[in-house]
Amino acid sequence: MSKPIAIMGTGSWGTTFAHLLDQGNNPIQIWGNDLEVISSIKSTRSNHKYHSEIVFSPQVEPMETPDLALSNSQLVVLAMPAQRLRENLEAWAKTVPTDAIVISLIKGLEHDTGLRVSQVVKQHLSNPFGVISGPNLATEIAAGQMAASTVASEDEGVAIQIQELCSSPRFKLFRSSDVIGVEIAGTTKNIIALATGIAIGLGLGENAQSAILTRGLSEMAKIGVAAGGSQKTFLGLSGIGDLIATSQSPYSRNRTFGVLLGQGKSMSEAKIQIGQTVEAMQSTEPILQLAHLHQLDVPVISQVSQILNGLALPESILEIFESSSHQVENY
């Protein structure tokens, strides 16, 4: 019998990813810190908080402790918010099997340190590592719609193993060696999606939204390249692909949060209405600090920072059209 796969996180994407892997032949051990969700999966085979339409097969086993979920696993899937990663890894470091492949589904930077997920993981684990990122709207994938993503690892053999274990007829994975670029893209696209959402909430049209997306993509790529990533990554699934999905879909939390702000909702009202993690709220400042470290001018990201910090009104997103740095189009 195949060794189990550990899914560490029972939120929207973790639940959906467990459902994707449930189509294969590997036993799955899923854990989350919400005991009500674990109890729901155990008693009804569904996560009634997220995606009650998903019904797990008997090969998906909910675990009440992380140690039980990680036990004997061949693959450890990290599917929690970026800000909870360090504390979890500190608790799990001695439990994760040394030969297990660790996969990150996380899109964000650690707020206090500005570290990428792979950097935080390496501080605690020496396991082979890969990251999956792309246009992964969980609601669509949970409904059985087709999707494709990037799996990035510095070790091509590890990327191939992840492809073999996690691909399915409706979920295609393409390989990359650019872990840095994929992680930066997955983080920055949420910020640009929030900016696009604000524009939508303000009633701006497709032309203005497209301008924000295009100039935002330029800022994403500049930061990624400065951090050591490849510019080509930002023209792929984890770059422009994820940016389009996150900025244009009503299923996107970051876009929806921006829409609510543009419509006049307060930050607290918008957070309550979303009811889930809005990654851009924690990632904007460390991304902006990274841009400043490399002396990059990023008007879209800077304006989002001003709005999130209460230093500017949502209407100020229009100021990006007045930025002198965008007088000459460059990429």
Image (cartoon, rainbow, N blue to C red):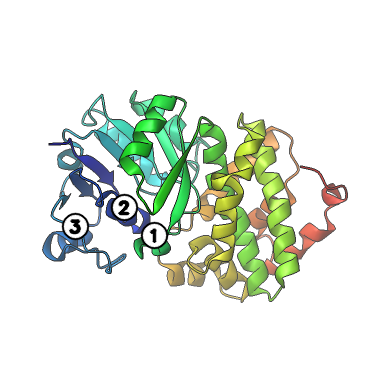
> Mark 2 falls on what kind of element?
helix
Name the residue: 36% across, 51% down.
169
In the rendered view, does 61 fall on the left or right side of 264? left
Circle 1 SS class: helix
Disc 3: which residue: 38
Is residue 247 rendered to the left or right of residue 330? left
Q: Amino acid at mark 3?
A: Ile
Q: Residue at x 70, y 45 (%)?
A: 219
The residue under the point 54% across, 45% down is 238
In contact (CB < 8 Å): disc 3 and disc 2: no
Q: Which residue is mark 1?
A: 141
Percent of width and height locating residue 312 = 69, 62
Residue 61 visible: yes
**Residue at the (36%, 26%) spot, across then down:** 128
Rendered location of residue 274, percent (x, y) = 45, 68
Q: Where is 177 relative to 323, above or below?
A: above
Q: On the image, which quarter does residue 85 sit in?
A: top left
Q: 10 Å neighbourhood of mark 1: few (<14), some, or many (≥20)?
A: some
Sequence-first disc among 3 and 1: 3
